[in-house]
Image (cartoon, coloured by chain):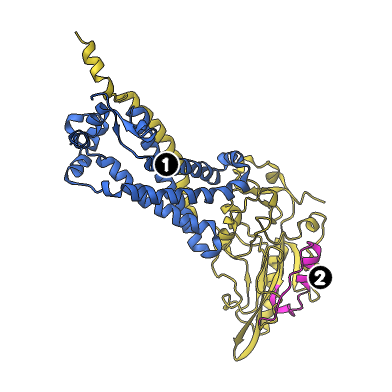
Chain colours: A yellow, B blue
Amino acid sequence: MADTLTIKRMSATPNSLIPLDALRSNAPVYSKLVDISRCIGCKGCEVACKEWNDLKVEPTKNFGSYQSHQDLTSNTWLLMRFNEIEVDGNLQWLIKKDACLHCEDPGCLFACPAPGAIVQYTNGIVDFNQDNCIGCQYCVTGCPFDIPRYDTSTRTVSKCNMCIDRVDAGLEPACVKTCPTNAIAWGTKDDMLALADSKVDTLRTRGYDKASVYNPAGVGGTHMMYVVPHGDRLDDYQLPSDPTASPLPMTSLGFLKRLGAYLFGFSIVGTLAHLLAFGQERPDDEDKESRARP
Amino acid sequence: MNNRLLDRFTYAERLVHWAVGVSFVILLLTGFAFSYPSLFWITTLAGGGGAARLLHPWVGVVFSIGMVFMLAFWIRDMFLDREDWRWLGSVLDYAARRHDKVPPAGKYNAGQKAFYWLQGVLAIVFVVTGVLLWIPGWSSAAVLSFSRLFHYASALAGGLLLVVHVYLGTVAYPGTARGMIDGKVTRSWAAFHHPRWYEDQSGS
């Protein structure tokens, strides 16, 4: 296999400290493509995800939906969300495969203060390394898709790792492998973009005028893309229409941190310069000095 | 009589001052570690990144409680009078040690009073955003990202004020720090730095 696990970015680590392998890497860049129009809601992908990643089974209850669980957890990395929406007078399931989208510009990684706790590989996978996680949950805040989940017992955060061990061995992720309708495709990003375009064209000929590809530019594109039959209803799919990896408060914080470092240095140097210019004020010694004078 | 020292700070005042001081320095150091990857090694002093993340908010609790008492203890002496506003107008003379041009100060000079109010406001921002960041489940991602911004901004401003505070209280004005250690200052120190307070003390 080609070098599939070359590090591209690491949290809280200047790019200059990352080995130059990434520049020389000829590793393929992968992507999943989820064709929502082909999903039959069997939840086989949820089971495959649990099995391959050895994730604890979590009891659930009937909450008035065909959806298996109410939310993602640190042990449930993939959840098919059954959004029941009325479209043109008919009830439809606008299903969303809710799991990490593996952003090209990962907001979680940018937000993380722990060196090496979040790693992005040149193949597009964004993975959490719990050994380095400090449990601050800034990644949860930084993710525009609300994916990472904190575990109060391990005090670390988890999410889908795109079955990185399978990908490294040249296999597709478990959810792709198990999908009985090929609703989840796997391949290079370029191939998946081309496939997505052809799927959108097909959907449009079938009357889905607003069909579109979900590959949002605000996060540099994603390595799990969707073919969305009702592209004008992203909100109903719970897909953010304009996600961003660098919201204004975070870019301001980055600027302020840089400024703050200079200001702290200046404050130390400034007080020292003041001391050298004006010396110490010792009213206690005045008596002695005047006595010493003839 | 001339050699007798003046009482400046009570035991309770010194206790809360140092509770706030020590906790704020720990907060600054661990906060620096979370803010600057090149300073992440500081977390090793706390027992690692995870331990530092656990410790930081609890130290913040000590800081918050100390701050409440400190602000309450001193608020009566911290309102600015007319002389104080004149003092602020001549703050550059004060910095340049042109003492004949600086109006005489009471128990606290106007700079100390401004420091009190600034740190009070910053502490409120610091603690509120800190609590939000401590338990992220209570708010939303948007609130939390603004909390990160204002938590850092208030820590930065408070840290810069701390540098000036420590400089003036130690090397610049010897004899000042003693007031926060055994609570006493010399008569000549008081007469020089806080003449109006000195007169009150001598009169009684």
Quarter of the picture containing the N terminus of chain B is: top left
Image: magenta residue range? A35-63
Residue type of the residue flagged with mark 1: Leu
- Residue A46 horizontal/vertical position (percent): 75, 71
Local SS, label 1: helix
Q: Residue A266 appears in which quarter of the rendering?
A: top left
Mark 1, residue position:
B15
Tell me whether marks 2 and 1 sit on the same chain. no
Q: Please report the residue visible at 47 percent of the width from the left and 51 percent of the height from the top.
A: A253
Q: Residue B40 appears in which quarter of the rendering?
A: top right
Local SS, label 2: helix
- Residue A69 horizontal/vertical position (percent): 69, 74
A107 is higher (above) or lower (below) than A185: above
- Residue A225 horizontal/vertical position (percent): 67, 67
Identify which residue, B71 or A105, lies in the foreground: B71
Crowding at dot 2, Cα within 10 Å, few <14 / some 14-19 / many 20+, comes out as: some
Q: Chain of mark 1?
A: B
- Residue B8 horizontal/vertical position (percent): 31, 36
Q: Please report the residue visible at 78 percent of the width from the left and 74 percent of the height from the top.
A: A44
B6 is higher (above) or lower (below) than A279: below
Mark 2, residue position:
A178
Q: Is residue A249 visible?
A: no
B115 is higher (above) or lower (below) than A107: above
The reply, left or right, for residue B9 in relation to residue B2 is right
